[in-house]
Amino acid sequence: MNAGESKTLRPLARTRLLAPLGPLAHLRLLAIAAAFWAGAVTLASGAEANAGGRVVIKDFMFAPVALTVKAGSVVSWTNQDSEPHTVASDAGVFRSGALDTNESFSFKFEKPGTYRFLCSIHPYMVGTITVEP
């Protein structure tokens, strides 16, 4: 900068903040938010609990994003993405290693409660298992 010149500070451009995610990631994030909202509405409206459950990991989302099961049920997560993902409880109750395409992780839910989980590689990927007595 030469004498007499002033440096103009400008705010970070929106695209600069979001660019590292890539163009499709923004749509995925919106889909995740919509799926989470839809799952929460389904559970709140009294969906029946499953005897067990399956969660698919696809398009950088857990589907379903919210699942209700009975105590003693086994829930399995299967990665159908071409990228590795993990399944990790936010309270440290369960944690998978990195799951490659078509690999699965299962956990038996013995105690009633609400278990939140995420992909530790992609922490915007979240879900909830509700365990009923």
Image (cartoon, helix red, strand yellow):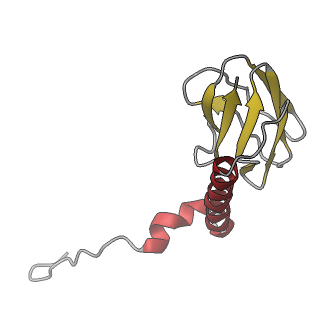
Q: Nearer the viewer, residue 73 or 103?
A: 73
Q: Nearer the viewer, residue 60 or 113?
A: 113
Q: Is residue 59 above or below residue 115?
A: below
Q: Nearer the viewer, residue 25 or 113?
A: 113
Q: Is residue 30 above or below residue 124?
A: below
How many numbered dots are placed on residues in this image?
A: 0
Name which residue lies at 67% across and 52% down: 45
Name the quadrant containing residue 87.
top right
Looking at the rendering, in which quadrant would you find the N terminus? bottom left
Q: Is residue 4 above or below residue 15?
A: below
Residue 16's x, y, as percent?
A: 46, 69
Looking at the rendering, in which quadrant would you find the C terminus? top right
Q: Nearer the viewer, residue 107 or 110?
A: 110
Residue 97's x, y, as percent?
A: 73, 26
Name the quadrant containing residue 33.
bottom right
Name which residue lies at 58% across and 22% down: 92
Name which residue lies at 68% across and 35% down: 129
> Horizontal placement of 92 versus 6: left or right?
right
Name which residue lies at 10% across and 79% down: 3
